Image (cartoon, grey):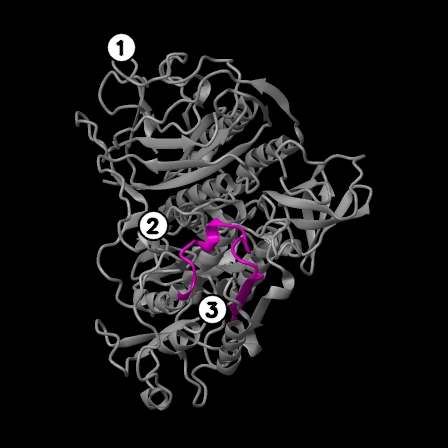
Amino acid sequence: MKEISEPMKFITRFYLSLLLALLGLAAQASNDLIWAQPMGAEGNDSSARRALLIGINKYKGLPRLQGSINDIETMRHILITRWGFSEKDITMVTDEAATRAGILAALEQLVQETGSQDTVYLHYSGHGSQVQDLNGDEKDDGLDETIVPQDGRTGDVRDITDDELDEIISRLRARSALVVLDSCHSGTATRSVDIRTRSVPRDTRIDLYRKGMVLKRAVVPLISSRFVLMTGAASHQEALDGPVEGRYHGFFTYALSRSLSSAGPDASPREVFDGVERELKRIQTQFGRSSMPEPQLEAPPGLLDTPLLIASREGSPSSASPQPTRLPWIEVQPKEADRVVLVNGLLLGAGPGSTWSIYQPGDTTFTPGRALAVATVTQLQGKDALARLTSTGTKIPSGARAVSLLPPPAPARVSIRIADLPRERRQFIEETLRKHVKDVDIVEGSQQARFLVDVQGNSLRLFSAEGLQPVGSYALDNERWGAGLALVVSRSANASELLALDNPSSQLKVKVRVATTKPPVTARGVAVVADTQPAHYRIRRQGESRTSENSLQLEIRTSADAYLTVVDVDSQGGVNLLFPTQHQRSDYYPEGRVRSGKAVLLPDSLQPANRAGFHWDYTPPQGTDTIRVFTSTDLETAQMIRQRVRALQESAAQARGGVTTRAAVTASVGSLRQDLAQVATRGFVQVHDPTPAVPTTPVADSGPVASAPPPNPPSPPAPSGADPAMPAGGPAPGAPLSVTPAEPPLAKQVAPDWAATSVTIVVEG
């Protein structure tokens, strides 16, 4: 994440106005943070966890959205199954009901029903806009920010301004509130029918707003430690609405839902926001975008690292609510001998090809290795998903629970839409595409497209799906442009397949960032912005010294002892296993094994004769690389991943022109998907680890091609503070693997588990 120091002109004032409104009543309550204690811990007053979820797809006179209703349906399911909200305390206001009058009435009802000990979650997914400020409280730009109701911009219906929201929400008596806004106020256009911005132009009907304007602020500016606000985009960016894994969502809400699904019970706003950032980067690569909107997190500094949501607990006044679980879940009903129904599975992304772990009814921990069975979705029936068990003979009880193990695979074919062109030119382009891109589908109308193609002069331009960022330009003098375009498509196919190998149910956490010479940025103010921009490197020229600008170095930290596997999908569509590598020294993290909580630099230094025995230098051509880092708690899973990646690497090298077809990619990664699915039922091993916990040693920040060091360079001494019981760079091969125990050391139940994350690298000349 990166810090912003200057006030955000548009969206920040809108959100801060909500913040101040919600905090205006905070002075009436205790200073104890509601998120950090069980409900009803103080006094005898009962408490409830209330949610108001507003989503609008079908606007009367404005462009339709496709993901807003899915957003709030998914969030509702997660609030109930993961965080213990009661169905009766969640209000949904959608489409035709979400008129200006309907939204204001729902807000008023929330104010009336909310008690002084309650917790409130408020979520809005829909269009946002602006209007001229009439009461003089917007000093910077003279504009009020608005949310646009379903009947907005029709007749004399006004948007709902931030001042109006202030007036209503300032009367909310809740002890705490979390507001999520997935809308935007920029007017950036998009040419794609698949991905749309959640904004509409400024409302110029000023006289309508004069009639109902709020004459003065209803709240007093009050800085409190009670409020967290998360939003979908900065004021100058577009919040996006598009298809993610087969279902339309607001990209920000989808990322937030994934982060809240896997976050620990004591996760802080910063940790949840980190999860949003990682998920947006995964979506970014799947869509081939050069960048993503930058979500906003606003909170006083003292709240950023404080537990965000503590679900209601047994024995509290709200114990009638569902008990919280480690993960959101779907109810399972047996159907036939080897088939089950995942009830409302679509709410959690149960698309065809997705894989689910099935646990006993009432299970709340969903421990890796203890699943009854694994099932793969074969088809959808409305919001339900039909799934086939991967093993026969397993009796699944009615009311069993399923949690996501693997999301749906990337589409087997590459879809491309061609802009309106003269018939002859269009026919030439189609023929060339089909000749060079073996698994291409030319799509029309409202069909989803992975890429867009248009022609400007004598140049063909390839755009990513949103139609805003060109990813390639090719001269149409001859057919050679087809081969260049095929390379880009191949790269996207490989990256999408590897990125689809994600484990939402993992207990293992991994954080990866590109190491630089600059120290990490920490937020000192009330606003934090997700860093969704890719890292930039330049090609290292012969004889040039290695620096953080031309030679890659990663900093990796895992939540448990684990084995690392680092894979690069380069700009030419090639797949490269970067780590472990044949070039590394025998004592440098043997088998890729690293310690829990320890920041690991790969390689350890950019200087000659480093401990690693290799460097990752960038060589031509220019382009975008995706670095995927897999981590597993057992060596068997790590070796399985590496074996499959090597097979994919070999198939890419053998393919004509170095371009791997989608069929080849699907076959190689499909085998890996099947192997990883079996990890869920592999079972337990009992491990006793007497090794003391390793203290985290601070490290300096400091698609690559692995380059060997000079012959037999001397190995430098192990760094100070290293574990004396462990060889430099990691534990000895074959040593037992476990989560680092607390003191005194205890026997741990260790089950095979794995996780993955990515970073995007832009390589420039």
- Foreground disc of the pair 3, 2: 3
The three-letter code of the residue at mark 3 reads Arg
Question: What residue is shown at x 81% (from left), y 34% (from top)?
Answer: 393
Question: What residue is shown at x 47% (from left), y 40% (from top)?
Answer: 494
> Where residue 397 sits: x, y (%)?
79, 43
Question: What residue is shown at x 46% (from left), y 35% (from top)?
Answer: 656
Q: Nearer the viewer, residue 118 or 578?
A: 118
Helix, strand or loop under label 3: loop
Q: CA distance from mark 2 to mark 1?
A: 52 Å
Label 2, residues with CA under 10 Å away: few <14, some 14-19, many ≥20: few
Q: CA distance from mark 1 to mark 3?
A: 71 Å
Residue 475 in sight? no
Region in magenta: 28-57
Q: CA distance from mark 3 to mark 2?
A: 22 Å
Mark closer to the chain start, 3 or 2: 3
Q: Is residue 386 above or below residue 667?
A: below
Mark closer to the chain start, 1 or 3: 3
> Where residue 512 sits: x, y (%)?
38, 36
- Give the label on residue 711, or none: 1
> Where residue 475 sits: x, y (%)?
31, 52
> Where residue 725 sits: x, y (%)?
41, 12
Residue 139 in sight? yes
The three-letter code of the residue at mark 2 reads Gly
The residue wearing badge 2 is 302
- Give the label on residue 173, or none: 3
Mark closer to the chain start, 2 or 1: 2
